Image (cartoon, coloured by chain):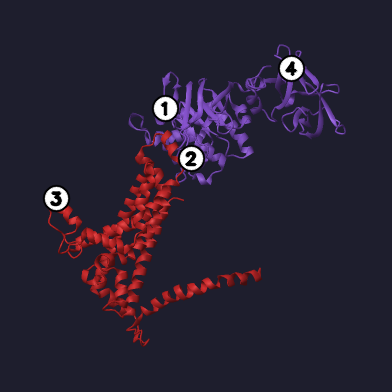
Chain colours: A purple, B red
Amino acid sequence: MKVVLKNLTKKFPTGNRKRREEFVAVDHLNFEIPDGKLVGLLGPSGCGKSTTLNMICGLETPTEGQVFFGENDVTNLAAEHRGVGMVFQNYALYPHLTVLQNILFPLQNLKGDKKLSRQEMLSRAQEAAKLVQISELMDRKPAELSGGQQQRVAIARALVKMPHVLLLDEPLSNLDARLRLQTREEIRRIQRETGITTVFVTHDQEEAMSISDCIVVMKSGVAQQIGRPQDVYDQPRNLFVAKFLGTPPINVFEGEVKGGKLWIGQESVLETPGVAEGPVWVGIRPEGFLLDENGPLTCNLSAVEVMGRDKSVVSTHPASVNATIRSIIDSENQVDTGKKTVRFRLRPRKVFLFHKETEARVY
Amino acid sequence: MDRNNWKGWLYLLPAFIFLGVFMIYPLVDVFVYSFEEGYNSASQSFFGTGWYNYSYVLHDPYFLQALKNTLIMVAVTVPLSTGLALLIALGLSSIKALRNLYQTVYFLPYVTNTLAVGLVFMILFKKTAYSDGLINLLIALFGAGPIDFIDGPYAAKMFVMCFYIIWVVLPFKILILTSALAGVREDYYRAARVDGTSRARIFTRITLPMISPTVFYLVITGFIGAFKCYSDAVALFGTDLNAAGMNTIVGYVYDMLYGDSGGYPSYASAAAILLFAIVLTITCINLMVSKKHVHY
């Protein structure tokens, strides 16, 4: 089912009694999630992504704006009537119930003509358990399960109602690094198999980029950019998005556009036709550096880290905003570590220019 | 390792001495007294040993009356006070406005002296030459005759007694249950809401199991406390509880030792051991029941 957010806004009153101010958690959010897609809401903590998820779920009422499921306005519909499944950050599995009882719980709530027979409930629970591969754990209590298994149970409990929309709040944050990798593929697989429109919240850009059909980058309650992960990475709309996506993060320099060329320090590093003259922020992706004996950008070499597949060159430059510059080069390249400096040529498509004040992208 | 070992025992020694002198020795002593027939504390002599003390106590109509009173009090006050406390705690945790005020009001009886509370109950219930008491004035509004709650029929006296005990134990239970309810993570309720769980089902399937260890703790301590009830009876009916027919087991023990008809440490010990046996049995039953119904 398609999910549409229109001008969605949530304001919270601040706790201070003397100054009755309002904190805007989500500010006029507009986007559409196509049917059957996996969407990642991405942003630093406190950016309003969880509040957005809660409003889609129905646990929070929007101050302004509307939520549509398909053609239906569900803004004022209670959570239980929306047909959503929610997986909470800490799973919220009932500790006194077994896995089977946990999965059955939502089904036992059904009333009236939706009521299921005991046999139907059991078969639906078995089906959901099979989907997330926990069939052999049905009689255990949540405390006897590992974090990854608890996560699966939580997903099974959310799916057993056959929701139109599945919502996941920081689904991977409680898992260790290895399990995280495995579980995110698992979420992707389950989403593909069921075809349920899924929204998940994360602060980890790698997580969002790796499995989403579409990502929404948020900051202070405002959607900064919405699009396919690769598009957002390749064409960031502003400095925040450019800095937020990518590991290692983008390298930012202070630069200036003069006479159709980009200057970093005293060197003209790139032709930038059609860009208004003046100071700019320069963002260069780590893979945007190419080793070149005669390259225009000279940096002070600090270290070379060998990763096997590629090499990471750590260097410094007076115009750099970050303490160090990190560039990724092919492992076949030889860097003379005896030298004090390293020289680079830049790949034009990996260099972005941002307006000095508005931080919006200009090139 | 060895050196630390004896040092550890040395550090524990003061505690052991105190526990030994003031807890273990008296306990053993009471047990011994209860089998010494005709023990005289002045001459430190007794005739012989055997079950006579128990037999005497179990045939003493005052003890049987005290036993009956205590059992009724326990059976009425423990379930009622725990249930009421749960209701009030649920109410307190579901309101936002004036919550702190209500919490303070409900906690006030806990810091009030038992005898002071007894005095207030006197004003409410006691019939004097000048007044029938506040409660009787209220009853009179509905056309019923005055009832003497303090010196009148047994049922009326027992009603006041149970009312009083519940009122006194309620605040502590409310306090404990309120904090237990606050300890249930909000996420469980949110998850239940998304799944469309009814309020009754949330209570029976989520809230109650989650706070079951606390409820169980309150039931066990409630049983023990109610069995040991004495000062509450004194506060309402004065020191001559046998005459009022409202004695409790602990009251009987006290009377046997120091009361007007007292001076019988052997009978008192036997009664105390009987009380101990009853409390032990009830607590064991509680523990067995809890294994089935308390989670974690």
Asked whether the residues under marks 2 and 1 belong to the same chain, the reply is: yes
Indicate which label's residue lies in the foreground, 4 or 3: 4
- Mark 1 surroundings: few (<14), some (14-19) or many (≥20) residues within 10 A: many
Which amino acid is tagged 1? Arg
- Earlier-in-chain disc, 2 versus 1: 1
Is residue B52 visible in the rendered structure shown here? Answer: yes
Q: Which mark is residue A82?
A: 1
Q: Which mark is residue B235?
A: none
Which amino acid is tagged 2? Ala
Indicate which label's residue lies in the foreground, 1 or 3: 3
Give the SS element for disc 4.
strand
Foreground: B113 or B215?
Answer: B113
- Earlier-in-chain disc, 4 versus 2: 2
Give the SS element for disc 1.
loop
Asked whether the residues under marks 4 and 1 belong to the same chain, the reply is: yes
Using the rendered view, name the quadrant where residue A133 is placed. top right
Using the rendered view, name the quadrant where residue A47 is placed. top right
- At horizontal 30% and vertical 69% (from top left) the residue drawn is B249
Q: CA distance from mark 1 to mark 3?
A: 53 Å
Which amino acid is tagged 3? Phe
Q: Position of residue A262 (x, y in %)?
A: 75, 18
Give the residue pinned by disc 2. A92
Give the residue pinned by disc 3. B142
Using the rendered view, name the quadrant where residue B189 is placed. top left
- Mark 4 surroundings: few (<14), some (14-19) or many (≥20) residues within 10 A: many
Q: Position of residue A344 (x, y in %)?
A: 81, 24
> Extreme right residue here?
A338
Q: CA distance from mark 4 to mark 3?
A: 95 Å
Q: CA distance from mark 4 to mark 2?
A: 54 Å
Give the SS element for disc 2.
loop
Which amino acid is tagged 4? Val
Give the SS element for disc 3.
loop
